[in-house]
Image (cartoon, rainbow, N blue to C red):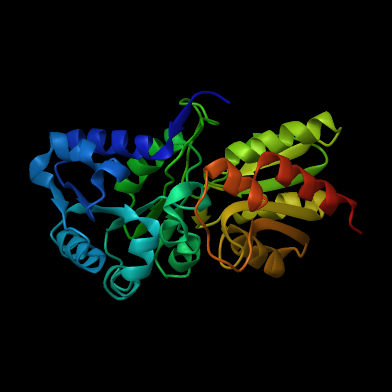
Amino acid sequence: MNENLPIRDGYGKALIQLGKNNPNIIVMDGDLSTSTRTNWFAEKFQDRFIDVGIAEQNMIAIAAGLSLEGKIPFATTYGTFVCGRAFDQIRNTVCYSKLNVKIVGSHGGISVGADGGSHQALEDIALMRILPNMTVVVPCDHIQAYKATMQLAKLKGPAYLRLAREATATITKREDDFIIGKADILVEGKDCAIFFAGTIGAEVIKAAKILRAKKIESTVINMHTIKPIDKEIIIKYAKKFGKMIIVEEHLKAGGLGSAISEVLAEKYPAKVKNIAIDDRFGESGQPDVLLDAFGLSGERICEQVERFLLEE
């Protein structure tokens, strides 16, 4: 793992490049542009940046109108606000009509830290992936966030991009392939498969190293696209190991674990261990302390994987 950078930096850099390449790119924000990095775009393309204020429903409605005029709006704010407050507009205006609106939810998961449960999006993936026509992408580091943003600009139709706040380890390389809908194998191992999505990948890689020191070799798979999900790789590793481990910084209900379990239930039933957040809200604290308390630090992930592999 290399340098630590916030994943939202990759989004901000991609927006600047898109602004140069395509005059139809419009960036919108809900009064949080310095936190989401959309202020970088605003500084260079002031006439294509709209800050709607704290009015998420209006932001999505305006984005829908812009898309009907051939623009490509990136509507950006914290994930918990845009997915919750503007759900009706996203469902009935954007998704129902298959409009070309990109919704970007920053500050996903408990690693938001001190902002507390009201600002920690733990159900955003569930809300977005159940909507017809919606694509859901959860990149793992700033490099992948850049690539995801660039590709989503070319993808026709509604899409949700989930970002995080804290600086996290860079676990992919600039030369690595990134294809929406196609999972990446980061580590190959012979004993088990661990699937993850998002910046929690840095903790999963840490857990894999601890496991290797204990003679347990894990395959680590980056499921950066929750929808459409890569069914082929899920079925392949279910057949290979019979047990599936999923790690996500999201509620157990409705997230990556649910998406993988739905595939397994239909195609190849296998035993699943979903290491995620139980039926509760987040809380305020230091990001590393919260990850450990919620069972999502590398050390806690390792312990749970070991116990699961010993189960009959």
Say which residue appears at 18% left-offset and 33% top-offset: 20
Q: Quadrant of residue 238?
A: bottom right
Q: Is residue 233 left or right of residue 37?
A: right
Front residue of 3 and 21? 3
Say which residue appears at 74% left-offset and 58% top-offset: 273
Residue 182, horizontal then vertical, whole percent: 54, 46
Query: Is 264 rendered above or below residue 202?
Result: below
Q: What is the quadrant of the N terminus in the image? A: top right
Query: Is 182 rendered above or below residue 58?
Result: above
Q: What is the quadrant of the C terminus in the image? A: bottom right
Q: Residue furthest left?
A: 47
Q: Is residue 175 left or right of residue 258?
A: left
Residue 181, horizontal then vertical, whole percent: 50, 50
Say which residue appears at 52% left-offset and 57% top-offset: 283
Please state the total of marks drawn on the protein image: 0
Query: Is 196 rendered above or below residue 231?
Result: above
Query: Is 55 rendered above or below residue 9?
Result: below
Front residue of 258 and 299? 299
Say which residue appears at 53% left-offset and 64% top-offset: 281
Residue 27, horizontal then vertical, whole percent: 21, 48
Residue 205, horizontal then vertical, whole percent: 65, 35
Q: Is residue 303 left or right of residue 145?
A: right
Front residue of 197 and 18? 197
